[in-house]
Image (spheres, coloured by chain):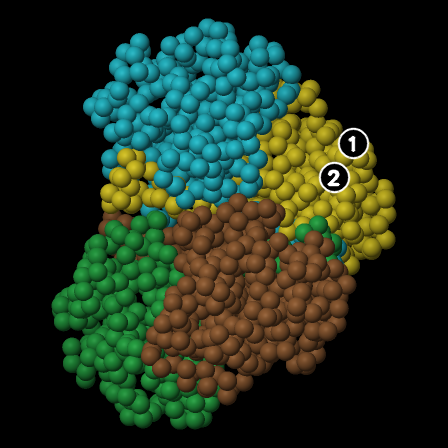
Chain colours: A yellow, B cyan, C green, D brown
Amino acid sequence: MAASDGATRKLTMNDIRAAAERLKNWGRWGGDDEIGTLNFTTPEDVVKAARLVQKGKVMSLALAYDAKGPQGGKSKYPALGRFNPIHVMLRTGTDAYSGVLDHRKIRGADDIIIMPLQCGTQWDGLGHIFYGDYMWNGYDCRTVTSMGAQKCGIEQTREKMVGRGVLLDIPKMLGMEHLPDGFAVTNEHLDKAEKHFHVTVGRGDYLLVRTGQIEAKMAAENWDGYSGGDAPGLAFETLDWLHKKQVAAIVTDTWGVEVRPNQTSEANQPWHWIAIPIMGLTVGEIFYLAELSRDCAEDKRYEFMFVAPALPITGAVGSPANPLAIK
Amino acid sequence: MAASDGATRKLTMNDIRAAAERLKNWGRWGGDDEIGTLNFTTPEDVVKAARLVQKGKVMSLALAYDAKGPQGGKSKYPALGRFNPIHVMLRTGTDAYSGVLDHRKIRGADDIIIMPLQCGTQWDGLGHIFYGDYMWNGYDCRTVTSMGAQKCGIEQTREKMVGRGVLLDIPKMLGMEHLPDGFAVTNEHLDKAEKHFHVTVGRGDYLLVRTGQIEAKMAAENWDGYSGGDAPGLAFETLDWLHKKQVAAIVTDTWGVEVRPNQTSEANQPWHWIAIPIMGLTVGEIFYLAELSRDCAEDKRYEFMFVAPALPITGAVGSPANPLAIK
Amino acid sequence: MAASDGATRKLTMNDIRAAAERLKNWGRWGGDDEIGTLNFTTPEDVVKAARLVQKGKVMSLALAYDAKGPQGGKSKYPALGRFNPIHVMLRTGTDAYSGVLDHRKIRGADDIIIMPLQCGTQWDGLGHIFYGDYMWNGYDCRTVTSMGAQKCGIEQTREKMVGRGVLLDIPKMLGMEHLPDGFAVTNEHLDKAEKHFHVTVGRGDYLLVRTGQIEAKMAAENWDGYSGGDAPGLAFETLDWLHKKQVAAIVTDTWGVEVRPNQTSEANQPWHWIAIPIMGLTVGEIFYLAELSRDCAEDKRYEFMFVAPALPITGAVGSPANPLAIK
Amino acid sequence: MAASDGATRKLTMNDIRAAAERLKNWGRWGGDDEIGTLNFTTPEDVVKAARLVQKGKVMSLALAYDAKGPQGGKSKYPALGRFNPIHVMLRTGTDAYSGVLDHRKIRGADDIIIMPLQCGTQWDGLGHIFYGDYMWNGYDCRTVTSMGAQKCGIEQTREKMVGRGVLLDIPKMLGMEHLPDGFAVTNEHLDKAEKHFHVTVGRGDYLLVRTGQIEAKMAAENWDGYSGGDAPGLAFETLDWLHKKQVAAIVTDTWGVEVRPNQTSEANQPWHWIAIPIMGLTVGEIFYLAELSRDCAEDKRYEFMFVAPALPITGAVGSPANPLAIK
């Protein structure tokens, strides 16, 4: 698919199959690899990323995890069973005040969370999406059972998610507050953005692409349409761009990275079909990029140290995170 | 309490009250502060911490979150209602294989976690422990209700937990595999450790004190006695040492930082009574320090960049984390 | 408050206090009683209730427990943290089909529920509502801590909830499909209904009052306003009627039994203030009475055997139930 | 398999296959039936059952649902992910006492349960066990997905679980406190018990077989070995007996009804392979039969009205219950 028609030509299953052949990274890091493109980042890259810390500013890219989160809005997309975090207490300050804890000789509070691992700011693990009966690196999809992911669990990434972060702020480049729903970010946009922001995406980078959609929803105080609804996002062709660039991971501020309505009705989230199981590309979603956007505009530096560890939940196919951009 | 008798003299409630007077930081960062000693770390400190990244090695200090975690072992201490993480699936690869997802035109897996926020590697938030009817900075303990912490929620720390990490490896210094239960780490030990490891703990540092207990439990494949049982840990007097040093946070590899049996039977976890509500000291527990210990012994560098973001769960009094030591 | 103005006069706190004095049952069944009016039903009543089974028809009065339940609708009332049941699987038929269970030599499915105990058809336990600092029988409200109810837990009722059921079908009597929001069912209505349906409510009975609201919401396929919104329901004065009648329990098909908007703005749910902590009256809510209504209209018999056991969840202040009317 | 060797001959897969052919009820109640043998109970049976209520005594056959439940004991059997109920509060009396609820103008408590549906006293739904790729009535096992059971969900039984209960108290008959682990209850035992207790099991009955194991575990205050360990229980041949008798359901006081170690090592719980998916027999487990046993011994009446409604949780493969025996 040529860049020139990146956003407009209708995709077919043949395009998806061809992309799977063209972009397949299975075996690239050995037959027993479980982390895919996270391998692109080297220790030297981590050292260089740390050098980008020059003013000591730490920015969180996470939404708060609470009942006001992005789940539960209206959507055209059939529900996946995800809900906003449920936070409940095991002991409280009101227990303390009431004197009922004093037999313990300590007054304390404690709490529990009940949450889908992909209900807010989150990493998709490589066990999250399948291509036919296969997952990343050719593992059988049946290795992800009700007991969890026996292969490619998110815990495999526990010492990754550290490297150079690069922000490509597409609406900023285009002079918009935020991209409209259905807007496809093409390879041409990405190329232009590199030039516009004087930054070159490279091997092992964590690439953050901003659309502004999350701020639009937050400003409206209404998440309707965010989860599974229409959205701006990456065109299918960006898979080739990301493959060539050899990024470690790709992150956006939307529910599902790719443009919706999708470029085809034959597959749902066709970009995901390739990115995760075929390329082994780790994907970050629902990242809050507003503050980072403002800061980069201010100091004109669109690169930073990026540290966004997943929780090592054994057998998980995703993880919440509090991703940090450190400049 | 003099350093010379740091581990041996029996504490009384008067000692605790005196420490509360002596070490109280309320108001130090303003009347509306909710993060306490995390304020000690400056942007300059963050820049300097990043300079410690020299070989690009990332080490996770987290235990895996799963059914084999440290909860559920036998204990003398009355149960707090904590349990190991419960990880359940919303969709699976076996669903995919069975064809039951194909009406969605995408094959994927999804999952949920149910977990106490302090069931594994974790930060204690400043809403976790009360002193009388008060919490950090003098807030009324009744601000922590069944609806969560209206003050000092862990989400306030979302852009903290980044700085210079320093490891004081006490058993290593003493030529032991791990410290025995009941062993109190005193100010003298801490002073000696600084000299022994050629590192000086300073303002804004994240101090990690290793006891080795966690490795002993893991080697035995039995967590009995870990949660609430006897343990090596900090003596009560170390509160003064930490106060003087102005550390940002203190971390150990035990369930509860301080030595158990405690140095008194009048209070449970007397060190906690002061550290959290009075000093506003953020505390990390159940950190896995074994790999870091080996690495520091090897390269003789006991300082590193430390990045350990809490999940910004609104109103939470603790948080799981995947803390990273980056060298 | 006279019956004649049962639905119209504005209540004051004085009315509530007077009712508390007038209707207080504390000590009536001994100082250590934890089940209140459930004591009214005698073994003889149970025998008589069983005699009402004459055609062998069993009717369930429960809504299905699932994601389509009554929680989550829009409401003027601040949220209580209740949500619809979350049902997740531990093993599935798709696991079985995929062969991943065969090492166990048995193919099976298993599941988990996560649910507020008062999210659907439910009993309010006597620990559910407090009057000042007191609960039923004068127990200190501090006996209901984060650890659960140490007094009046729903498990105390495990051998109750069996007796004669009587349906008073108010909209049926009035020739309406369902009562409108804000409609107060008064003592006069109850008296008339007894005559209309040729049934006399007596000591130890389980009284079911139908408003039809639940069917209206279900027909509209929209629960907005059901939880905490305006509703038909019992007038405050019915407390006296129920007290005189000595019913074992009272049940309606609404979220909260009593008429909303409430008859006062000084208290929320003033009827509850008296019914549960002062009278010790067990209350059933969100019961589905449509089928029972049709059946009683058909056979003209408004009495039946009623069996509606609560789950004996230790320390719970409520319980889901599958209440049965057996005729 | 002859009755004479019911407890001793080693089962083979051929025996299981032969039983499947011999005892298959698929289609017996139509191709779209989802409740199997529960169909055996007629309205007349319900009327007759109600006539058994003669002294008005209600006995609960449920264990309390709490942290002291039967899950978590040591077992030779690989864990199924079941745990004891987790009961947490959404509002408390200590909140009330602390004044933090008063802005609502009502003081109340509320709670949540998190529990496997088969963690305590429970019904197995017909979606719980598969035979090859099939479930009850020949439905494809893939109808039980991560979204729940699309066929044979427990909600289908919402107006069943009412009928005549019969207790066969095997240890009582044999003059034992409780049957030892590995003791197989054979058809001969069942026949003898009918004579011994002057009761005849018939079509549509709910048959309760007591082994006493649950009381032994409770007396020892230790559930080790209860879940999945060795146990007394029904011999495989009892399937034929139950089939001939046309019982509605079968209940025991053990974790898994059938004798363990099982009579074969080729299948795990071979009796389950046939009872649930082939016969469509609803099974009750972990029922507490001690009080009922004492009462029946006292009044010499081993029949009673049995009412044990499952919660209509949509798509569930099991349900907790508070089963009542009413005499």
Mark 2 neighbour class, 10 Å CA radius: few under 14, some 14 to 19, many 20 or more? many
**Position in image of residue D303 (x %, y %):** 45, 77
Residue at screen point 53% across, 37% down: B69
Q: Is residue A258 left or right of residue C4?
A: right
Given residues D261 and B31, the one toward you in this image is: D261
Which mark is on residue A29? Answer: 1
Asked whether residue A274 is in view, the answer is: yes
CB contact under 8 Å: marks 1 and 2: yes
The amino acid type, in three-letter code, at marker 1 is Trp
Image quadrant containing the N terminus of chain C:
bottom left
Please say if A198 is above or below A192.
Answer: above
Q: Nearer the viewer, mark 1 or mark 2?
A: 1
Given residues C115 and A300, the one toward you in this image is: C115
Q: Of helix, strand and loop, which one carries label 2? A: loop
First in residue order: circle 1 vs circle 2: 1
Q: Chain of mark 2?
A: A
**Position in image of residue C15 (x %, y %):** 16, 70
Residue assigned mark 2:
A280
The amino acid type, in three-letter code, at marker 2 is Gly
Marks 1/2: CA–CA distance: 10 Å
**Position in image of residue D5 (x %, y %):** 67, 65
**Position in image of residue B126 (x %, y %):** 37, 33
Q: Is residue A15 left or right of residue A57?
A: right
Asked whether residue A57 is in view, the answer is: no
